[in-house]
Image (cartoon, coloured by chain):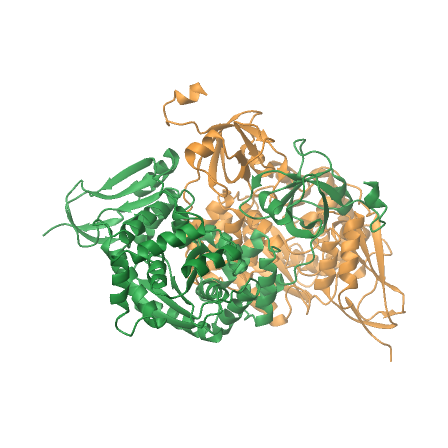
Chain colours: A orange, B green
């Protein structure tokens, strides 16, 4: 260590050797250091200290966990997986450890917690620090909570959206019209994007779709697409895919479009919090960063969907249009029926199976999913001037029926890295009707919860397969849905949850 | 493992051997398990899964961190220090690992985030789970943030306070009058409790004082007292101390009075959030649980104190009296001057030094600290009927002057485990006046921040020693305050912070 001491920059050593612990801390960067190490002792670091780690030209802020124990060798800094990825050090590389710079932007978060409005400068400061990984999970949780519900007004939402666009890449396709769509979730299995993209690109439009992974649902579009093809493309690979096929369906996080959004989602997911302002900023920042010009928003409405009334959908839609206008996006809306799941599967692999059935024109393909996708694709064809007003739906149906959409989907999957086989879960439990009658209602929220407890989306094959729809007559003992799980433990867990709740399917006894 | 499998309770093994990792995760219970271990594989556990750990008759909920790496032996569950303390297993004991029960009370937290009022049942459910350690740090951060600022109304604050009392021990002293005091912080160095307790107990009152550690300040009363004597007494030791001396000054957390408060403080501290409702619930739940009947609240007011205006103090005081009445406590208020630090030291050891100087009647003892303590002690003597109205202050002054208070303080320290020497920090930096003039203002918040960056309260000897008061004339180059630190790194850090901010002492140049 004398080479370092001779630099004369400091009068005590601040370096340790990098060592990969292999600990997965769910993306929060942690560094493990012995309490008796020279750095802790000379710098006064204790557990929970936020430290700046520097390895060569890379640096990262991490939370310190002090260790008393010999499994961590003297002179070593143990890195969690997230810290290791951020620093990407050579084996045994020197890591310089110092206090993290004071995080001034937390004063804005506190102001928001106390009910004050934040201006553009405040959002830029917060989101810049969030995207740079300077917020601990506690800080992220406070920010997300402070902005949740309807606590952001219009100008705050615009400022948050702009800040989120500004910290990531912004794509430019060199075309006048670049279309996009987004479905505001809450409706299990609503996987229309995987149908809409091949249909409208088969008609000549450009649709470079970036999707998010699930926040509070059992599967996000990116999770479902990942069952069928790689989605973690970098920008160069995404650009090649779009140039070759006119479209793509990739995970927004890996192309670093609105990277702050992906950091926030990591905390929003376990907290299971919804937030109008963050929802709008999340959706539109991704669209703007992806270089879109025309965006269709699909808002499913139903008593157990994410948006529960037409009034709420209109309020949210208005906010999306207003913020879109402020950042230069033409946003249009379609409010759709959110009464029950779309398709049959809930969970990445089960939803992917439904999508393939529609694309291949299988006789048993879920008709509700097909109809909904055609309607949205028709809207986009008209919005993007690929079909005269009133004829978009017909064009979409033609392209699906004659196999052009299926060919296009295969081309997109190949361009993204190759079409994959859909996995099947080894553990299953069938839930049956207790009484005969007619299906009167389905609780989408509890159904989604069951799919999550069964392991979705982390286990792609896990989820729920729905066998009956609202209005269907059922016999006592007839299967209503099947839980799918990758492990016996998760199946038990989801099954126990279902068994101890009021029935997810309401059956009104036949007259 | 065949003995377990033969129980036939489950068709797969769910047990691992306990192993102490020595990792200090700042009290959040974490369990480290190999991704290839039999339990992860059979149960489908992944990082961030909340698991229930059972060892013999004890159990704890922990967050899972999955590990890829050979430092963790196969068949072993690595426990963080918090998890180890909660389970207290024999070496190599079997730990059963299962999914944590679903945490239904988080639905109340979400409701609060979305702006709904919570009823008593909701607070009981949340606080019960918090005290039982079932909330991850993310959940705690969401709850604290959702209740911060003034988001709890009167009945919610009463419900929260009652819930916090209900989950801990509640002491009964068998006496009609048990006095207590609390200072609503924000004023560095305001360590009157260590003077008030010996004065009023020397006059025959019962004052079993439990104090908290610092939340956002450089030292809490418990931190300062700990410099002079042990404060982590259990209830039996606290009772012995009070029976022998009439008083005590102990840390509330170790006697498990209002244990939920200590869990919440652990998250409030790094977030640095204030909350009126949580402040009231925190203060009064501790008093009620400690068996107090009469409570004096000291509210220092000043532009940089925690309470910034007399109006704000009155509003907070009203809320404290209202909630006190609802839970059966007689609460009275004293609004005091919060313009500048009280005493000279800011930080546990420096404050303890000031307290000893007053108790010993040293000529150089800080007079402001003495006067303030006498005033509060006089109030309490009158409130507790130990002095006729109007003569409390005189009695307090007598007891301090003739050495009875100092003798009593020594007796209390001895009863708590023995009087200690005050440590002195090895690293110091003097900050001097840039110009000649008069001290016009002192920024208490920034001063407190500097003391914290220097290491207080974790390093007891760290902090700030103040050499000039508002109104004092100073020469250019005259010392204004001295930073004290245990390590060179912390001194650098605090010094850098002070150097790059506007001056903490405002000096108006002499006319």
- Asked whether residue A374 is in view, the answer is no
Q: Say left or right for A507 vs B373.
A: right
Compare residues A46 and A336 and report the one nearer the observer: A46
Q: Position of residue B363 (x, y in %)?
A: 20, 50
Quarter of the image for residue A23 reads top right
| The quadrant where residue A31 appears | top right
Does residue A274 appear in the picture of this structure? yes
Of residues B434 and A159, the one nearer the viewer is B434
Q: Residue at x 31, y 41 (%)?
A: B483
Return the x and y of residue B238 as percentages of the image width and height: 48, 57
Who is closer to the viewer here, A41 or A161?
Answer: A41
Q: Is residue B201 left or right of residue A485?
A: left
**Rendered location of residue B266, percent (x, y):** 50, 52
Residue occupying the point 41% across, 61% down: B246
Q: Residue furthest left?
A: B511
The answer to whether A237 is drawn above or below residue B292 in the figure is: above
Residue at image point 72% right, 67% down: A339
Q: How many marks?
A: 0
- Indicate the quadrant where residue A21 lies: top right
Residue B172 in picture, x, y percent from top left: 51, 67
Image quarter where the C terminus of chain A lies is bottom right
As displayed, is residue A240 above or below residue A181?
Answer: above
Task: Looking at this view, name the residue that lies furthest to the front.
Answer: B244
């Amino acid at each position: 260590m004398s080479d370092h001491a001779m630099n004369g920059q400091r009068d005590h050593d601040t370096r340790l050797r990098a060592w990969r612990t292999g600990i997965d801390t769910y993306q929060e960067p942690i560094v493990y250091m012995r309490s008796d190490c020279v750095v802790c002792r000379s710098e006064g670091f204790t557990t929970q200290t936020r430290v700046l780690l520097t390895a060569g030209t890379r640096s990262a802020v991490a939370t310190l966990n002090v260790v008393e124990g010999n499994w961590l060798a003297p002179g070593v800094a143990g890195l969690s997986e997230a810290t290791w990825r951020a620093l990407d050090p050579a084996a045994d590389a020197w890591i310089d450890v110092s206090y993290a710079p004071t995080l001034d932007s937390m004063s804005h978060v506190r102001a928001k917690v106390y009910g004050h409005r934040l201006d553009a400068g405040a959002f830029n400061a917060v989101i810049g620090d969030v995207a740079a990984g300077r917020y601990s999970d506690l800080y992220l949780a406070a920010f997300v909570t402070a902005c949740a519900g309807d606590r952001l007004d219009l100008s705050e939402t615009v400022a948050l959206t702009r800040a989120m666009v500004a910290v990531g890449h912004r794509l430019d396709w060199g075309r006048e019209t670049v279309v996009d769509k987004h479905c505001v979730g809450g409706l299990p299995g609503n996987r229309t994007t995987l149908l809409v993209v091949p249909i409208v690109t088969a008609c000549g439009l450009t649709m470079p779709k970036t999707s998010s992974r699930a926040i509070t649902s059992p599967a996000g579009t990116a999770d479902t697409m990942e069952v069928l093809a790689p989605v973690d493309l970098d920008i160069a690979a995404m650009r090649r895919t779009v140039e070759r096929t006119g479209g793509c369906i990739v995970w927004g996080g890996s192309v670093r479009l609105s990277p702050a959004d992906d950091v926030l989602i990591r905390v929003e997911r376990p907290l299971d919090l919804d937030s109008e302002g963050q929802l709008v900023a999340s959706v539109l920042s991704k669209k703007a960063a992806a270089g879109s010009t025309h965006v269709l928003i699909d808002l499913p409405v139903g008593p157990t969907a994410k948006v529960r009334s037409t009034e709420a959908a209109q309020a949210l839609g208005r906010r999306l249009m207003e913020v879109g206008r402020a950042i230069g996006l033409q946003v249009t809306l379609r409010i759709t029926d959110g009464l029950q799941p779309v398709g049959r599967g809930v969970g990445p692999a089960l939803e992917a199976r439904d999508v393939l059935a529609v694309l291949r024109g299988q006789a048993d393909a879920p008709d509700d999913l097909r109809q909904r996708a055609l309607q949205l694709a028709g809207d986009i064809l008209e919005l993007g001037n690929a079909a005269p007003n009133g004829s978009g739906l017909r064009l979409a149906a033609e392209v699906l029926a004659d196999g052009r959409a299926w060919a296009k989907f295969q081309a997109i999957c190949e361009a993204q890295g190759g079409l994959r086989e859909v996995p099947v879960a080894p553990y299953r439990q069938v839930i049956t009707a207790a009484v005969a009658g007619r299906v009167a209602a389905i609780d989408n929220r509890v159904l989604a919860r069951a799919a999550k407890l069964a392991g979705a989306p982390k286990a792609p094959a896990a989820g729920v397969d729905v066998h009956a729809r609202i209005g269907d007559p059922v016999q006592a003992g007839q299967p209503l849905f099947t839980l799918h799980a990758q492990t016996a433990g998760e199946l038990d867990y989801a099954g126990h949850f279902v068994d101890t709740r009021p029935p997810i399917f309401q059956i009104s006894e036949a007259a």
